[in-house]
Amino acid sequence: MAIGAGGTKPNISTFGADQFDDFDARESRTKASFFNWWMFSSFTGGLVAVLVLVYVQENVGWGVGYAIPTAGLALSLLLFYVGTPFYRHKPVRRGAAAGPARLVGRVFRAAFANRRRQLHGDQLHEHDAAWYAAAGTKRRLHHTRGYRFLDKAALPAAAAEAEACTVTEVEEVKLITGMIVVWLTTLVPCTIWAQVNTLFVKQGTTLDRTVGGVRIPAASLGSFITISMLLSIPVYDRVLVPLARRRTGEPRGITLLQRLGVGSALQVAAVACACLVELRRMRAIRAASATAAHDTVPMSIFWMLPQYILIGVGDVFSSVGILEFFYEQSPQGMQSLGTTFFTSGLGVGNFLNSLLVTAVDRATRGGGAGKSWIGDNLNDSHLDYYYAFLLLLAVINLAVFVWVATRYEYKKEYLSDGGDVVAGMASRETEMAGGGKGKVVERSKVIDAPLVVVEEVRAV
């Protein structure tokens, strides 16, 4: 499963987004909604699995339960192969584009080697437009002001046989560095999301789960995350984005990092809600003296519903926003690397959650003399303290994210091989290339206006 997911998850969304033509106005506008609906379809499949497959497995049989997704995967594979002749393929020639690890190592080595040299912006090495037209594998990037120590890698080589890095190569490493910094600020939200399948479920098992005489599983509330997300995505894409677009002038309504910020703020609200619910549960425990491990607290499990809904709505901003951000800001030809940031963040978040739970349990247990915040018996623990600790982490992380976001420089690239540069993924021209003819655009916004028709030069 891990090997198969490693091949599909980083590439499915990337390959789907690559089907849109940046040089076509209509397709560029449609691409802005692609990740919303890709996530919508993905979570729809998850909801079907929870509501249908689980029922089949428990009431019909595990053989039939496994046969259904097996047949579905086989059909998906068949449809993929049938559609192969119709897909847009964007091959990358290794001779013209170094791998990410090699590129990062080369730029950092060159910057370190030139650390004592004076930096002059007008002396930085860069290929002309004809070189990029002939290579056909990447777009020329405009020089930005961030991470200026890396600019020394593009200084002309002192030795005749040595070759300096280009401005575009340096900017690609800057993009990767910037994405790593943003990725680090997403780890705390991913850790908070991990509570859904751990502490939220364990907390729910202590509450009254009877509905109409039927005792529901504590984990079933997780389906409300999916449901709230499925309901929120169409509202966001069809209602909120047009309203925000008219107010802000941004084609996406809000920028990519603003979307991530809203998602992080909603997660802060979800943790605050979970803390308040736990405080009420503790009061109910004291009132009923239900301190034993298997005692049912006289409080409905549906008190936990708001925190699940807040996480589901927050996912519309955070999960979809992270996926879209890393795809859009990845260097040309490295989009699958960008989406890998998204999936790896979820994995690291789960590991950090396990580490955090273990560390807090040992620290608060005090060698067995104290009362653990998250002991085996939640009715005799202080889960409210742990949620307050998570809330503090979330607030601090949100402040750090805002600081990083205000200093982040979006990717600026030339979208044509000569003359005026087409704002293929931007809503405005930002600045002129120094001394050149091309206009530079930010790849943070999708255009919502007609494009100048430009002939794209393709390498044969």
Image (tube, grey):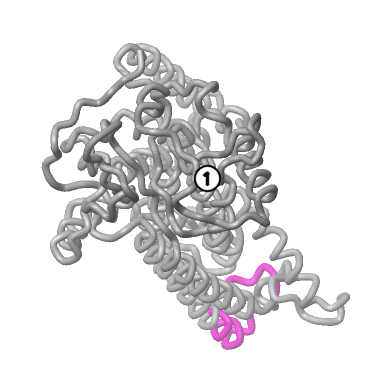
Residue at (58, 38) in percent of width and height: 164
Using residue 32 as the reference point, say whether residue 393 is left or right of it. Answer: right
Q: Name the quarter where the C terminus is drawn.
A: top left
Indicate whether residue 285 is drawn in magenta.
yes
Indicate whether residue 14 is drawn in magenta.
no
Using residue 400 as the reference point, say whether residue 447 is left or right of it. Answer: left
- Does residue 226 appear in the picture of this structure? yes
Residue at (44, 34) in percent of width and height: 127
As drawn, 385 above or below 218: below
Q: Which residue is mark 1?
A: 170
Query: Which of the two residues, 266 or 371, is positioned nearer the viewer here?
Result: 266
Query: Which of the two residues, 288 or 51, is positioned nearer the viewer here?
Result: 51
- Residue 125 position, x and y percent, is 49, 41
Label count reads 1
Q: Quadrant of residue 458?
A: top left
- Residue 14 position, x and y percent, is 41, 34
Q: Name the quarter where the N terminus is drawn.
A: top right
Q: Where are the magenta residues, as a range?
A: 281-296
Using residue 306 as the reference point, say whether residue 400 is left or right of it. Answer: right
Residue at (55, 24) in percent of width and height: 63
